Image (tube, helix red, strand yellow):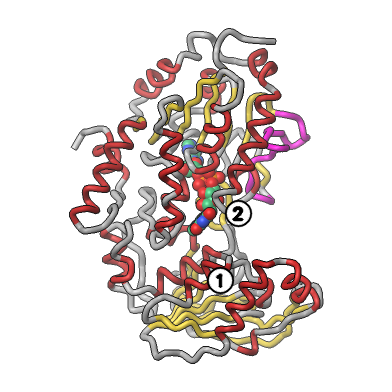
Amino acid sequence: MTANRPLRVAIVGAGPAGTYAADILSKTDLDVSIDIIERLPAPFGLVRYGVAPDHPRIKQIIVALANVLGRGDIRFLGNVNVGTDLTLQDLREHYDAVIFATGSFKDADLDIPGIDLDGSYGAADFVSWYDGHPDVPRTWPLHAKEVAVLGVGNVGLDVARILAKHVPDLLSTEIPANVQEGLEASPVTDVHIFGRRGPAQVKFTPLELRELGQVPDVDVIVYPEDYDFDEGSMAAIESHHQTKQVVKTLTDWTLREPTGASRRIHLHLLQEPVEILGEDGKVVGLRMERTALQGDGSVKGTGEYLDYEVQAVYRAVGYWGTEIDGVPFNDGKGVIRNEGGRVIDESGERVPGFYATGWIKRGPVGLIGHTKSDASETIANLVEDADALYAGTQASPEQLSPDNLLRLLKSRGVPVVEWSGWEVLDAHERALGEAAGRERVKVVPRDEMTDVALGNG
Ligand SMILES: Cc1cc2nc3c(=O)[nH]c(=O)nc-3n(C[C@H](O)[C@H](O)[C@H](O)COP(=O)(O)OP(=O)(O)OC[C@H]3O[C@@H](n4cnc5c(N)ncnc54)[C@H](O)[C@@H]3O)c2cc1C
């Protein structure tokens, strides 16, 4: 079947996954008209609100994403939340197909006693704070001298590094003023990172790990008793170049003497959290159990317990996708149920017209680049389904008109930030940065972001 009109496609989420999906879809043979709908007034998802501010090279990916979104053939509709400002029924009535690229911004749970104590935090919340996410509180309680970070992935590294770094070493970055003030007042001296398994099982990437050893006036301290390699570890080291590099860096550090720096990052392995210890409702310590490798790289508790004095605990045990009401969700994995990006219901039946891509399709693991291959698969399937999408559409010709959706949003009083509005906000943030000798200073409050973008200031 052919149609004499473009296929109208909504992409929900303007992170890398949504943006790559828009780009790839726009370059197929299909005649398409694409809206990318984003709940924040700013695009780029976790590249803006997750990647650490002291990683400007990675943040540069924003330039490539902006080239796609600003090209003119894809319409950006920012500050529009699917679920409240627009319902799924609205999307069905205005589009032939919807691609959910809503990512993750919440922490996975960690079910140990004490997790709800005052001073126990999710890494994702802290990341949102230091990256200036508009929907989290402006202040962060940085009162602890000794802090634990649970988890040996790159998010754990980011959190530990930002906690330990001295503020002057962050001033060239885009951190907002409230974050600068918060970090300046932090009395932190020791940050303890903990991993359940051994050196060959940590999830750090080599570059990010090496960077930890170069933070000015911060010593990285490792403990020789945490270095054990079973058969599974040796196999991993031999077969994965990345594991070999990470293990080499960790092993090199066992030979380094502390320099007497004013702050320390301790890296503990083969220990798993048993309980966060509290007094008067507040974190005062952390009980860990020593684990032992089992031969295949897995570990088992040994019954030996170690207590650490800490006043704050950050769990960096993974992100978790958020459900959108009415879109089939796998609670066990935190993803939208799908097969190759085609959304399916609990019984495995296709949900016509609905697709998923990125972290909400695959789970919150992997780098920005991985969302490109995700998008390729989802778009290939959508293109294959094009005839069925035209035939099964619930949208009327009048509703399919792009103006119609904008009218609907305006009638609901939603202050939509289109691409031109983002450009104004972007220029404003750069100007704030220039005045302070920095590349950018982020605007944090949502109403201030929209006021600037919409020229209401
Ligand atoms: C702390 C941290 C640091 C990282 N550092 C790196 C790094 O250094 N290098 C690297 O390669 N990768 C890094 N990553 C991974 C990278 O951020 C992800 O691979 C990537 O962002 C996933 O893309 P996504 O588009 O699926 O999701 P996201 O980036 O989360 O984008 C999803 C978008 O959907 C929007 N959205 C959600 N719900 C709705 C809704 N209901 N309506 C409308 N819009 C909605 C969100 O606001 C968001 O903009 C990091 C991740 C984290 C968490």
Residue at the disc numbered 2: 366
Residue drawn at x 58%, y 8% is 4
Q: Is residue 258 left or right of residue 249?
A: left
Which of labels 2 and 1 is toward the front?
2
Examine the structure image and report whether residue 381 is included in the region drawn in magenta.
Answer: no
Residue 287, numbered label? none
Nearest the viewer among 107 and 276 is 107
Q: Is residue 106 visible?
A: no
Task: Give the amino acid type for the residue marked by disc 2 in the picture.
Answer: Gly
Q: Residue 185 location in percent, x, y?
A: 28, 73
Nearest the viewer among 140 and 266 is 266
Q: Is residue 383 left or right of residue 421?
A: right
Disc 2 secondary structure class: loop
Residue at the disc numbered 1: 150
**Does mark 1 have its CB less than 8 Å from ligand 1?**
no
Image position of 269 with respect to 34: above or below: below
Q: Is residue 34 visible?
A: yes
**Does mark 2 have its CB less than 8 Å from ligand 1?**
yes
Viewport quadrant of the C terminus: top left
Nearest the viewer among 364 and 274 is 364
Image position of 323 with respect to 37: above or below: below
Q: Residue 312 location in percent, x, y?
A: 45, 74
Query: How far separated are the C-alphas under marks 2 and 1?
Result: 19 Å
Image position of 451 with respect to 197: above or below: above
Viewport quadrant of the N terminus: top right
Residue drawn at x 71%, y 34% is 344
Q: Residue 137 location in percent, x, y?
A: 35, 55
Task: Give the amino acid type for the residue marked by disc 1 in the picture.
Answer: Leu
Q: Residue 428 location in percent, x, y?
A: 24, 44
The stretch of residues the image draws in magenta is 332-350
Disc 1 secondary structure class: strand
- Of the numbered discs 2 and 1, the one sitting upstream in the chain is 1
